[in-house]
Amino acid sequence: MNTLRLYCRSMAMLMKSQLQYPLSFLMQTLAQLVMEGGELMAVILLIDRFDRVNQWGPGDLYFFFGLMSVSFYLTEIFGRGLTGNFPSMVRNGQLDTLMLRPRGILTQVLCSGADPRRIACIAVGTVSLIMGSRISGITWSPLKALMMAESVFFSFWLILGLFMVEAILTIHSVKSIELANTLTYGGRSACEYPSDIYPRPLRVLFTVIAPFALVMHVPASIILDKPLFGWPVWTGLVTPLAGVVLFGVMYLLFRKAMKYYRSTGN
Amino acid sequence: METQYRGAVLGGLICQTFFGLVLVAIYRAMYAGKPQPMPLSSITTYVWLQQAFFRMLLSMDTDLLDRIRTGAIAYDLCRPLHLYGYYYSRILAMKMTGSILRALPMLVIAALLPEGWGLALPASVPALLTALAALILGLFCICALENVTMGLTMRTLDPRGVQAMLNLLLMTFSGNILPLTLFPDSWQRVITLLPYAQMLDAPIRLYNGEYALDKVPEVMIIQICWTGLLVTGGCLLWRANQKKMIVQGG
């Protein structure tokens, strides 16, 4: 609990510091809005030309896109320390200072950064979700709302876990981050679309190794009443747990990597 | 510089191949539902050529931005050089080496992929040659455009907002996010005339054979006009900036 309070404190402080330059903050948030809006526009243009992919209509595709935007950028707001700052911390030796303090490394890393500008991307994602829900004519029920909340919650852990792969690789090789991008940013671009449109190897990758399909697509497809793989409704509540499982595995690997860590020193 | 980090180059290559494969898979799935007038192979070729020459679009001269911020640009002003020309050739060199070293292996990988996934052969030998010529003209054009962007960023001290928007325009209308051929047909007439389309889109369409050979003079005239216009505009902008430049820092 103490750790959680520390984290909340740091977040509040970081947000406040970001807001010290309101005009710069506003400009950058606007830029984020335009950028994510551009991504959504690409999806809209594609749908305009092709109408649908397999069994997925326009509304379904907007829904999947929105779910990914909201989850991914939520992770980037609150996990910025890990998703953005960590590699440079290793490279310039700042990580060493963290080892002297009486708190866990991961806690400190997470407390070190926040990126409130991403709120703009979440807004775009929300618009896309509402559009998708309207067009597909989803009939919401408490169960579906719960499923949705659960999916977003565990997506957060999933994406944070994937960014930890990047962190672990950074510790081992200092300069190979682009490779880890295939799982994080590559996973984001790919899984904006339901994973069953992909050929088998990619589908396996996004179900077993980076389980976006289990955490997002299974519950989303059940909410849309078009269950992926024909799975029953209860699976939509169970499969998102894969997100926290992945995070757990990565946490253990991260601790192992920290034992290996040799300072880059200066 | 590029050959010093072999691991990073390899990682980047794997990353780009992966992104390319994902894009191709998406377009393949969409094509399966509703085939389009242009063949699927021309879309996959478009994707791979974009992936291969992606480095050309990326703005790389972060060094100059730093110099503007720190005030080190004052040293450049003391040098007996034409400032615009100096930075133009720097950007040109960076883009050329950066994209050639990335493009060659990428093209080999894309050509080895199975039919319907990878890079198709050019429409004809003359198409390949004119596409190469157009690519070189496109390179001149994008360097000119980047210098205009630089000129604009010199005016604001926190360039991140402006730059992000200009980059989005660049990525969208050069066909990097979505092939320009997939944009609505009614937009095509306008977006193919924009400077962004001259960089990669025009050469790719020549390679695909989507632009017939008799369209070559028209394409190249547009490219040359844009390059001329952007170079002139950039030169004037830089000169105006130099006159009222206030160097930061000490």
Image (cartoon, helix red, strand yellow):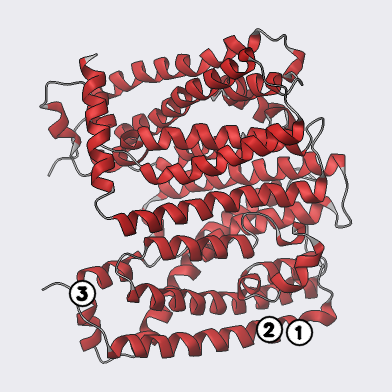
Residue type, label 2: Ile
Identified at 72% across, 27% down, the residue is A196
In the image, residue B4 sits, relative to residue B68, either above or below, namely above
In the image, residue A121 sits, relative to residue A38, either above or below, namely above
Residue type, label 1: Glu
Chain letter for mark 2, please: B
Task: Determine whether, in the image, residue A34 is placed left or right of residue A136.
Answer: left
Identified at 50% across, 80% down, the residue is B144
Residue hosting label 2: B222
Dot 1 or dot 3, earlier in sequence: 3
Asked if disc 1 and disc 3 are in contact, CB closer than 8 Å, the reply is no
Residue hosting label 3: B72
Q: Position of residue B67 (x, y in %)?
A: 26, 71
Identified at 68% across, 83% down, the residue is B222
Residue hosting label 1: B218
Q: Nearer the viewer, residue B227 or B9?
A: B227
Helix, strand or loop at label 3? It is loop
Residue B247: image tag? none
Chain letter for mark 3, please: B
Report how far apart the C-alphas of labels 1 and 3 lie in the structure: 43 Å
Residue type, label 3: Ala
Q: Quadrant of residue B225?
A: bottom right
Helix, strand or loop at label 1? It is helix
Report how far apart the C-alphas of labels 3 and 2 lie in the structure: 37 Å
Assess disc 1: are there few (<14), some (14-19) or many (≥20) residues with their C-alpha within 10 Å of its C-alpha: few
Q: Are marks 3 and 2 on the same chain?
A: yes
Assess disc 3: are there few (<14), some (14-19) or many (≥20) residues with their C-alpha within 10 Å of its C-alpha: some
Q: How many marks?
A: 3
Asked if disc 2 and disc 1 are in contact, CB closer than 8 Å, the reply is yes
Where, quadrant-wise, is the C terminus of chain A in this rendering? top left
Q: Position of residue B19 (x, y in %)?
A: 60, 44
